[in-house]
Amino acid sequence: MPAGLILVVDVATVVNGVSAVAIVVGVVFAVVQLRQSDRDRRDAAAVTVVGTVQTQEVRQAVRMILELPDRVDPEVVRSDPTLLDAALAVDSACEMWGSMVYEGVVDHQMLDRMVGGWVRGTWSRLSLWVETERTELDSPNVGEWWQWLVEILEDDPDPGKKLGAHVAYRRKLRRG
């Protein structure tokens, strides 16, 4: 076999090898970019969650609702316009968060760390009111994502909910 032909075969093999490496590097780069994009999306969703909680209206509504007994009589809520407004504000926030968790925009355990305690607490106080509204309005959609969210948080809570974040995450520091 002539020496020139062997060189051509070797160059072709090298070019094929370089092409294969380039494809592998490209795929790895794409996977890294997709993961970073997902992380960025989750972080942006977390900012949205925090922003909605930080409104004065929602904070006051949560405070008012948490002062009520569990499964408060729906007439107590309906007869007080301020309390009804608070219940509706909390319902709206929890419906939005439930939908965001379902759609995968927000991780349920991240949401649990941020607002899970009061999502559960307000549900335990207003669940009878929601059930009554569903019946009287003949609409299963009243509070549907709020209830779904509470059930998800109870089925798979963030570890910090049982132990407290100060214990569950004592040695863990999340970076990038």
Image: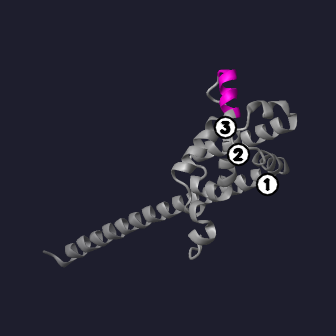
Comparing 3 with 125, the one in front is 125
Amino acid at the residue labelled 3: Ser
- Give the number of the disc on residue 168: none
Horizontal side of 109 relative to 25 (left or right) equals right
Q: CA distance from mark 1 to mark 2?
A: 16 Å
**Mark 1 touching mark 2, by CB under 8 A?**
no
Please name the residue shown 70% across and 52% down the image. 49
Does 134 lie within the magenta span?
yes
Please name the residue shown 33% across and 69% down the image. 15
Q: Which residues are magenta?
A: 129-138
Q: Which residue is mark 1?
A: 54
Amino acid at the residue labelled 2: Thr
Q: Name the secondary structure under disc 1.
A: loop
**Mark 1 touching mark 3, by CB under 8 A?**
no
Q: How many residues crowd around disc 2 within 10 Å: few (fewer than 14), some, or many (20 or more)?
A: many
Q: Quadrant of the N terminus?
A: bottom left
Q: Name the secondary structure under disc 3.
A: helix
Horizontal side of 23 relative to 66 (left or right) equals left
Q: Earlier in the sequence, mark 1 or mark 2?
A: 1
**Residue 174 in sight:** no
Please name the residue shown 87% across and 38% down the image. 82
Q: CA distance from mark 2 to mark 3?
A: 8 Å
State whether the magenta stretch is mostly helix, strand or loop: helix
Q: How many residues crowd around disc 3 within 10 Å: few (fewer than 14), some, or many (20 or more)?
A: some
Q: Answer above or below: position of 33 versus 78.
A: below
Residue 74 is situated, as x and y percent measured from the top left of the image, at 74, 32
Q: Quadrant of residue 158?
A: bottom right
Q: CA distance from mark 1 to mark 3?
A: 23 Å
Residue 11 is situated, as x and y percent measured from the top left of the image, at 29, 73
Comparing 149 with 131, the one in front is 131
Q: Earlier in the sequence, mark 1 or mark 3?
A: 1
Residue 89 is situated, as x and y percent measured from the top left of the image, at 78, 41
